Image: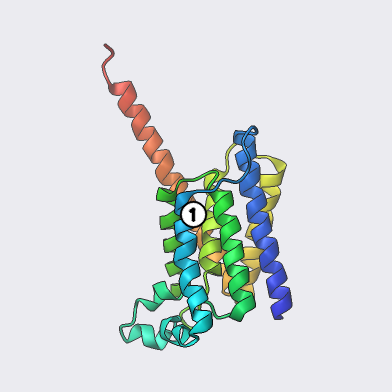
Amino acid sequence: MSPIVESLVLWVAFAAGWLAVAAAALRRAPELPPVRFTWWGLVLWLVVAIPSLIQLAVPRLLEHGMRDDAIVQHGQWWRLITANVLQDGGLAGTLSNLSILAVTLLVVGRTVRGILAVPIYVVGGIGSMLLQLSNPGAGNSMATLALLTAVVVITLARPVSPATLIGSAVLILIGAGLTVLSNEHGPAILLGLAIGVVVRLVQRAGRRATTTTSQDRPSA
């Protein structure tokens, strides 16, 4: 896949995810805007942006922090973390990844809290790096995709709006297609789907436990 086609496909994937989450948010509360600025979103963005921008002035940081199977297996496990706050796409790739992350945080900030979104981002980023250890590199795009896809699953609720359904379907199809083509972003999307399903199951179990406790509690 050529870099131009890959970039176009990824933009479509992100746009589909934004559409799905924003449409779900508007279905729940149409009187509110589909995006929201959050303090945790700003902090998370800065945690990624500051090292990424410093790297532009100090290119050697990429060599010391990128994911690399052989080096990680020799004990430098922290590269699974640092690879998420460095960029291997130069100036254009850095600005693109940071812009996409900013929009994603604004969109998901409307529907989930930082106590949920931040761990998903971290797990999605580290998990994606683990899945791509044999392919040296760095960048936050996989973590962003995993977060967005997980939130798409978390926010799915009946009745599902057509926009949410279309956006979700496009995102899943792109994830499956990129995985077949051995593109690193495909597994990140599928990982996000898995994380979203797990979160939904945990949330459902928590609601059932709360309901059962309330029903068993003796009335006054």
Q: Give residue 7's position: percent from left, percent from top.
A: 69, 72
Left or right of 203: which side holds 216? left
In which quadrant of the rendered image does the C terminus lie?
Answer: top left
Instruction: Check the image and report above or below for 99 versus 118.
Output: below
Residue sitting farthest toward the top: 220
Seen from the viewer's position, the closer of residues 125 and 100 is 100
Q: Quadrant of residue 14?
A: bottom right
In the structure shown, which secondary structural element does the residue marked by tag 1 occupy?
A: helix
Residue drawn 64% across the image and 76% down it: 92
Q: Give residue 41's position: percent from left, percent from top.
A: 49, 54
In which quadrant of the rendered image does the N terminus lie?
Answer: bottom right
Residue drawn 51% across the image and 58% down it: 147
Query: Residue beneath label 1, please?
Result: 41
- Label 1: how many Cα within 10 Å (few below 14, some 14–19, many 20+): many
Instruction: Check the image and report above or below for 113 versus 118.
Output: above
Residue drawn 73% across the image and 77% down it: 4
Seen from the viewer's position, the closer of residues 170 and 76 is 76
Q: Quadrant of residue 205?
A: top left
Q: Can residue 171 be seen in the rendering of this structure?
A: yes
Q: Give residue 177's position: percent from left, percent from top.
A: 66, 68
Residue type marked 1: Gly
Instruction: Check the image and report above or below for 126 versus 107.
Output: below
Seen from the viewer's position, the closer of residues 216 and 94 is 94
Left or right of 176: which side holds 58? left
Q: Can residue 131 be seen in the rendering of this structure?
A: no
